[in-house]
Structures are given as C-alpha cells and as structure tokens.
Image (cartoon, rainbow, N blue to C red):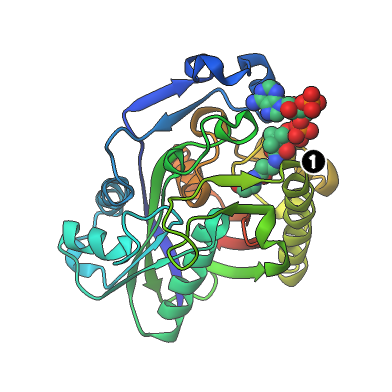
Amino acid sequence: MNSTIIGVGASLPLRCMRNSDLPGDLDTSDEWILQRTGIAQRHIADGETTSLLATRAARNALIHAKISPQDVDLVLVATSTGDYTLPATATLVQRNLGLRGAAFDVNAVCSGFIFALDVADSFIKSGKFRCALVIGAETFSRIVDWSDRSTCVLFGDGAGAVVLRAIDDDERGVIFCKIHSDGNYAHQLITDGGVSTTKDAGLLKMSGREVFKFAVEKFHESLMELLAENQMTVADVDLLVPHQANVRIIKKLVELSGVDERKVLVTLDKHANTSAASIPLALNEVKNTVFSAKNVVLLSMGAGFTWGSALIRFQ
Ligand code: UT7
C-alpha cells in the first residue's frame, strides 16, 4: 500500500504587491531584491485568514482530484501562522468543507509541507486513513517586521494543497520521505511572542546569511541522501521542487548537485517565500508536468532548523 497525489490546488490573496509597491520608507529597491533573491512580487492577505486560504486551496485540490469531500478522512494543515493559538487551523478547514475524520496542524515552518506529507503518507501506509488533504497555508505578512528590509521583502502569503489517496501499487506514489530537525539552531530564525513567554504578538527575526548557508548545505545533503537511498542519480530526477526562499540558494544547489537547471522549478519570483505553502503552490503552477513526470523530488529547509525531502513517482 502506498499513497499518491491525485489532486493539487492553490489560493492566493487578491492583493499583489510588486517590489515597487513596498513601503516607500524601507530603503530598498526592486533591483536589490531581484538580484539578491529573485523575488519580483508577493501576495499579501488583506483580511484573508490562513484558514480561508487553506480552505480555498483544499477545495480546488478536491475539484482537481474529482473526488467527493466525503472521501477525505484526514486534514493536515502545515502552518506556523494559524488563525488562533487554538484550535488548529485544520479543524477550521474541516468545518468549512464539511469533512469527517481527524484534523490537526503540523508546525515545521518552511519544511511544514514535507513534514505533513510524511505524516499523512505514514498514516495511509499504516491503513489508519485512506484519503488526506495535505495543505500548506501561511500569512507571514502578519509576522514580518515591516520596518526590517532584510526580512519583510522576502515573504508572501498563500496556500497550496494536495489530495493524497491510498493506492494498491508499491511502484508509484510517495516512494520516500525523510524529515530532520536540529533545535540547536532555533534562534537563527524565530518569531517570538509565544503565549508562554509573552503577551505581545511576535515579529520574525532571521540571521539571513547563516540560514542561507544552512539551506544550501541541507538541500544538497537531502538530495544526495534521497538519490542514494533510492539507487538513483540526478539524471533520474524529472522535476525538482525546492522550497522557494531565494533563487541564489536554488542556483547553488544546481551547481553542487549537477541537476539539470531546466528540471528545477522556480516560482518565488511570483510568490516570494510563502513558508509551508511554497512547495504546494509551486506544484500547482505546473500541474500537468507533475502528473506526467516519473520522479518528482521535493526539498525543504526552514526554522527550527528543519529540513526534509520527498520522492513521488507518478508513472
Ligand atoms: O524560508 C526559510 C529560509 N530562509 C532563507 O532561506 C533566507 C536565507 N537568506 C537569504 O536569502 C539572504 O541571506 C538574504 C536575502 C536575507 C540577504 O541577502 P545577502 O546577500 O545575504 O545580504 P546580506 O545580509 O549579506 O546584506 C548585504 C547588504 C547589507 O548592507 P551592508 O551592511 O553591506 O551595507 C544589508 O543591510 O544588503 C543590505 N540589505 C538590503 N539592501 C537593500 C539587506 N536587505 C536589503 C534590502 N534592500 N531589502
């Protein structure tokens, strides 16, 4: 028994903020942001909540999968910007769509989607559940410090979702998923303001260069681990979807691994870094390519630090 993706959907806030629309007192420029990150624009929630974006993305994924909401028995939302401290955003999505079964959130920040995929895949392989909505949804615009040019220009809001269903085929579907964390790096990328430490809402702080270095190292290490454990080479990868944080991180990965650049998906120019939503949002951009590919590889790195990889075989 395996699990496989049978539908993909996404949702972005209506408001699109180009680099030139950023607050005038930020002391930045379109040129700097494009050259140093590859980001040209981001969508910013204006009243759209994380649960609303997640619900819309999930609904679109269900339509794409052509299945009834009644078939879903598990809802996972990967997010670190949920609507409430409690309950989980996943339960709000479950209510909005009238779904049954279990619903809970997974917080592994930018790696959240791969962590949630691994959880859902493991549940399905164990026989506990048969059909899961795995959603990445974030509203980072609410936690960035809009006076800090080194972070606020990097992030955007949005949601992406996949429908993951059991299949009686060991050769296709989620073939491999590996997740890692190292809490020694917790303070390198942090949003304070947790209810047990303070009553104030927190703001995101990041040691950009350290995170950059770690992301390059772990993207490369995770890809090599995935290839070795599945007796594959880079030539066997048909589509590589890395977490979308900075195009220079992706270029370094291409340089180090030798993977063909044309097989590497880059969508951060349009969405910026949407944390847990970035991978499913990217998958949604190339739906047809995804389903006709043989080996699709996902890679992530995020706060914690967390990192991980997944191999999904469609043909
Ligand atoms: O999703 C989780 C993973 N997150 C990431 O992967 C992010 C990883 N880090 C990065 O992408 C990059 O480190 C940044 C984009 C955050 C920064 O790029 P950098 O090339 O590492 O810049 P830097 O931090 O070395 O700063 C270089 C200069 C500094 O000015 P001085 O000190 O040389 O005068 C910064 O103040 O660039 C300045 N700077 C800016 N200038 C114009 C930083 N941000 C901006 C900005 N506009 N937005």
Ligand 1 lies in which image quarter? top right
For this orientation, the residue located farthest to the right is 256
Residue drawn 75% across the image and 57% down it: 218
- Residue 80, horizontal then vertical, whole percent: 46, 56
* Residue 160 in the figure: left or right of residue 40: left
| The quarter of the displayed image where residue 224 is located | bottom right
- Residue 9, horizontal then vertical, whole percent: 35, 46
- Residue 63, horizontal then vertical, whole percent: 24, 49
Q: Quadrant of the N terminus?
A: bottom left
Q: Is residue 243 visible?
A: no
* Residue 51 in the figure: left or right of residue 149: left
Q: Nearer the viewer, residue 178 or 216?
A: 216
Element on which disc 1 rests = helix
Q: Nearer the viewer, residue 69 or 246?
A: 246
Q: Is residue 271 visible?
A: yes
Residue drawn 41% across the image and 57% down it: 199
Residue type for callout 1 = Lys
- Residue 46, horizontal then vertical, whole percent: 31, 32
Query: How many labels were placed on the picture?
Result: 1
Which residue lies under the disc numbered 1? Answer: 252
Residue drawn 49% across the image and 33% down it: 271
Report whether the residue tagged 1 is closer than 8 Å to ligand 1.
no
- Rendered position, 128 above or below 90: below
* Residue 34 in the figure: left or right of residue 141: right
Residue drawn 54% across the image and 19% down it: 19
- Counting other residues with Cα less than 10 Å from the Cα at mark 1, is it few (<14), some (14-19), or many (20 or more)? some
- Rendered position, 107 above or below 28: below
* Residue 284 in the figure: left or right of residue 217: left
- Rendered position, 255 above or below 177: above
For this orientation, the residue located farthest to the left is 98
Q: Nearer the viewer, residue 212 or 28?
A: 28
